[in-house]
Each structure stands twice: as structure tokens, then as C-alpha cells.
Image (tube, rainbow, N blue to C red):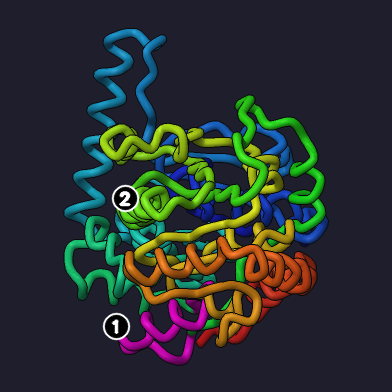
Amino acid sequence: MKRKVTIIIENLYGGGVQRILQIICNHFDYERYNLTIYSVIEDTPYPPFYPSQIDYKYIFNTIQQKQKIWERIWIKVKNKCKLFIYNHGSPRLFYQLFIKEKTDVAIAFIEGYATRIVAGFPKDTKRIAWLHTDLENNPWTSVAFKSMNDEQKSYNDMDYIVCVSNIVKSTLEKKYNIKTKTKIIHNPIDKERIIRLADKKPETPYCFSVKNNRIISIGALINIKGYERLIKIAKRLVEDNYQFELLILGKGTQEAYLKNLIKKYDLTSYVQLIGYQTNPYPFLQAADIYVCSSLAEGYNTAITEALILGKAVVSTECSGVKEQLGENNEYGICTQNNEEDLYEGIKKMLQPAILSYYTQKAQERGKIFTLEESMNQIYNLIENNNKD
């Protein structure tokens, strides 16, 4: 008999966590498991991002323009009622009212709301939380909990907590005094798919305007990604007479601000915001250098993707980066997490001999990432009957 697995995530698209979920869904063993995906916010699981084998459900409705006024009002009322119960009731009550279904394994695939919801599943369900970020440097999850004690209780109610890197694990254990139930599973990467998609034409027609020193960064346009300081670094590189072009792929709340900053610094010939791309790999393939300017990360999937495509990497020191680039910059340049050191790291990578060296090292590093190992770790977690 197939085991039933339920995964809860906030939404289906838009970031690295969602890309990782898509990889898992597309390589899941549907001969052994029935998989249900819940998004907190109503969405649509389009192929090929999500396969037809999944059972999709959602918790909060979205309001669409095509709906009649009374339908929109009714959706707002329902959503407010659900949100009221979420904020003032227990996770168990929220489960009993709005989810109800039985499952063998429930996985909160992201911190915050999904984690608190999974904490409300029955105790005979194997409950798993999945952490993709460093909760010390990026404590965004406070919006989803009544208090730190409420958040700590949700993690204590889990049977296992998956952390995507060593730093994510150590930060969680220190912050919430949790030691026995944490496990590390690095983000699964579909290497063959990345290589295949990199050879396709980009959905947004754009080509780098320079032949060398083509720099790219991929991520949501939000403060934690550090794009403001990356644009400031670009200004300094122009003043230092470096020839380069920087493309930033993504969407987010800082988009207008960053566009204005580019104009303010007269960087329109050097820095371009390309927007969110469902297939970012042709752009990554065309680049020479991948830069991660983040203030905090859990395990930056785009760095691994860059290594797979043989691109030299410069990154601020965030959770997981040294596991990808080596403790002593063997496979890329990891800088201290501030503007000055990132600036110096990018300047160093723009030296032809250094760039050539790290391009070769990236090609070596990219060979170690295998999808099969990560998927087997996930299956072992699902099958393990020893609940801590």
C-alpha cells in the first residue's frame, strides 16, 4: 500500500525554495507514494514545473478580476475568518477546520506559516519541518507565530527538522535548544535538466553587450538579497574603469527602488534588471561570473547551478556557501558579508588569470552534485519509523 505524503509550502513559484520543490515533485517515486501539495495561497501547478501525479490543494483563496463582486466579497470574508483562527487559535484547531485529511507524513517545506500549520497535524502523523534559511540572520518567520515560544513549540512538535546546511542546523539548535531531531539534506539539483535548459533560447530576448566580464545574479528583488550594495559596487567598478555588464534576474518589492538606483548612479549601460525568468539558465550559461550578494541564505541553489554550468562564483559568506565553494576558497571566492569585501572579491575575480582559474575549479566542483543521493535521503526520512 502506498504511503501518503503531504507537503505544505506558501506558494508554488517565485524563488529557490519553490524550484527545489519542483525538482522533488518531478523526481518523486509515485510507485511508492501518493503526494499532495498544499500551498498556503491559492496557485496553479502548471506543467512541466509540477507533474500531473500530484494532488494539489490550497488553504487561502486568491481574488481574481474575472470574479463577480459578491464572489470577491465572499472570498475576503472566508480568508479573514481563516486568518483570525490561524492567529488566535491553535495549530491543531486550524488543521481540524481547514485541512482535516489523514496523511502518513506531513512536511512543512518552508519556515513560518507552513511550519505552524504542520505542527497542528495529529501526533500519529510523522511531522517534518524543512529549514532553508539561517533564522538568526534572517528571522522573518516571526510574522507567522504569536511569539518565540510559539515558534519553538512548533519545532519541538516535529519528529524531524531538515536543515539545508551546517550553519542552518547549528543556528536552529542554538536558538531553540533542539539537538536530537535535526538532519542535513542539501538541496537536490537536477543537473541534466539544468544543462538541457541552458541550451534553449531565453524567454526574454536579451544578450550581454560585452564579450568578457559578464556578471549575473539571480534572486528575488528583496532586501535580504543585498542587491542595493551590489549596485553600489557596480558604481565603484565603473569608477575604477572596469569593463563589465551585470544582469540581475528576479522580481520583488525592491524592483522600483533598484531601477531608480541604477538611474541615479548612471549605470544603465552596465546594470540591467531582466525580471523573473522561468528558465534562467540561458542567461547563466552566457555569463562568466555568478555573484551572490545576500545578507543571509540557507543554501543558495543558484550557486550550485552556476557551478554545474562551470561559472566562476563570488559570494558573501552565508549559510551553506563554504560547503559549496570550500573552506578555503578552493572552488570560488567567499568574502566577508559586507560591501567592501564583496567589492574586493569581485575585483579579484575580474582579473583574467583568477577568472580562468576559478572557471576551471567550478567545472570540477559541479561534477559532485547528484540528484539520486538527495532523493534517497528524502525517502529514508519518510520511511524511518523511529520517531525521536
Q: Residues within 10 Å of mark 2 (few under 14, many from 20)?
A: many
Contact check, label 2 and label 1, Cβ < 8 Å: no
Tell me, yes or no, whether the highlighted magenta stretch contains residue 162: yes
**Which label lies toward us, 2 or 1?**
2
The magenta span reads 160-181
Three-letter amino acid code at disc 1? Lys
Q: Which residue in the protein does label 1 denote?
A: 175
Q: Position of residue 98 (x, y in %)?
A: 38, 45
Residue 202 shows in this picture: yes
240 or 313: which is nearer to us?
240
Residue 188 shows in this picture: no
Position of residue 30 relative to residue 167, above or below, is above
Residue 228, disc = 2
Q: Position of residue 369 (x, y in %)?
A: 74, 70
374 or 153: which is nearer to us?
374
Real-space CA distance between mark 2 and mark 1, rounded to the nearest whole angstrom: 29 Å
What residue is at 68 percent from the left and 53 percent from the top?
23
Extreme residue in the front direction: 241
Q: Position of residue 244 (x, y in %)?
A: 53, 47
Three-letter amino acid code at disc 2? Glu
- In the image, taking residue 105 as reference, residue 263 lies left or right, namely left
What residue is at 35 percent from the left and 23 percent from the top?
63
Q: Quadrant of residue 51?
A: top right
- Is disc 1 placed on a helix, strand or loop? helix
Q: Position of residue 127 (x, y in %)?
A: 49, 70
Tell me, yes or no, whether the highlighted magenta stretch contains residue 287: no
What residue is at 44 percent from the left and 77 percent from the top?
168
- In the image, taking residue 36 as reference, residue 83 lies left or right, namely left
Position of residue 335 relative to residue 301, above or below, is below
